Amino acid sequence: MPFSFPYPDVCMCGLACLFMSLLSYIYKIDINVSSSYPPIPVTVKYELKDQIIADLACVSIPIHIHLHF
């Protein structure tokens, strides 16, 4: 199921906008998951693209959605 982040431009989230090879970068984002989603394990695919839609990073992360009251 596709999901849009509240800040599609990572330059607005404190990440340097000029990436250089061989350097490490940390990008952190908190995501609120709708309570309408069932409590199941899923794999999240996160893609970070540049302004011409070329891939900068692509990761798949296994997670488990839990109910919190």
Image: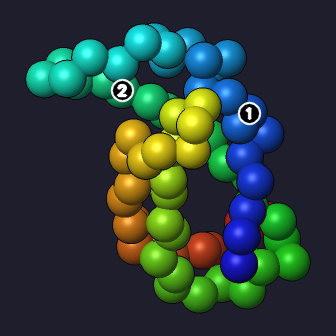
Residue 4 in sight here: yes
Left or right of 53 in this view: 61: left
Q: Position of residue 36 (x, y in %)?
A: 86, 78
Q: Residue at x 75, y 54 (%)?
A: 4
Q: How many marks?
A: 2
**Depth order, front residue of 52/1:** 52
Mark 1 lies on residue? 7
Q: Quadrant of the N terminus?
A: bottom right
Mark 2, secondary structure of its residue: loop
Q: Residue at x 57, y 44 (%)?
A: 53
Left or right of 12 in this view: 64: left
Quarter of the rendering containing residue 59: bottom left
Mark 2 lies on residue? 26
Q: Residue at x 44, y 30 (%)?
A: 27
Q: Position of residue 51 (x, y in %)?
A: 60, 31
Q: Quadrant of the C terminus?
A: bottom right
Mark 1, secondary structure of its residue: loop
Q: Looking at the image, tell me whether mark 2 or mark 1 is earlier in sequence order.
A: 1
**Depth order, front residue of 5/53:** 53
Q: Are marks 2 and 1 in contact (CB under 8 Å)?
A: no
**Depth order, front residue of 35/5:** 5
Q: Residue at x 26, y 17 (%)?
A: 20
Identify the image's colour scheme: rainbow, by chain, secondary structure or one colour: rainbow
Question: The disc labelled 1 sits on which kind of residue?
Answer: Tyr
Q: Position of residue 8 (x, y in %)?
A: 71, 37
Residue 51, above or below 17:
below
The residue positioned farthest toward the right in the image shown? 36
Quarter of the rendering containing residue 37: bottom right
Q: Position of residue 29 (x, y in %)?
A: 57, 37
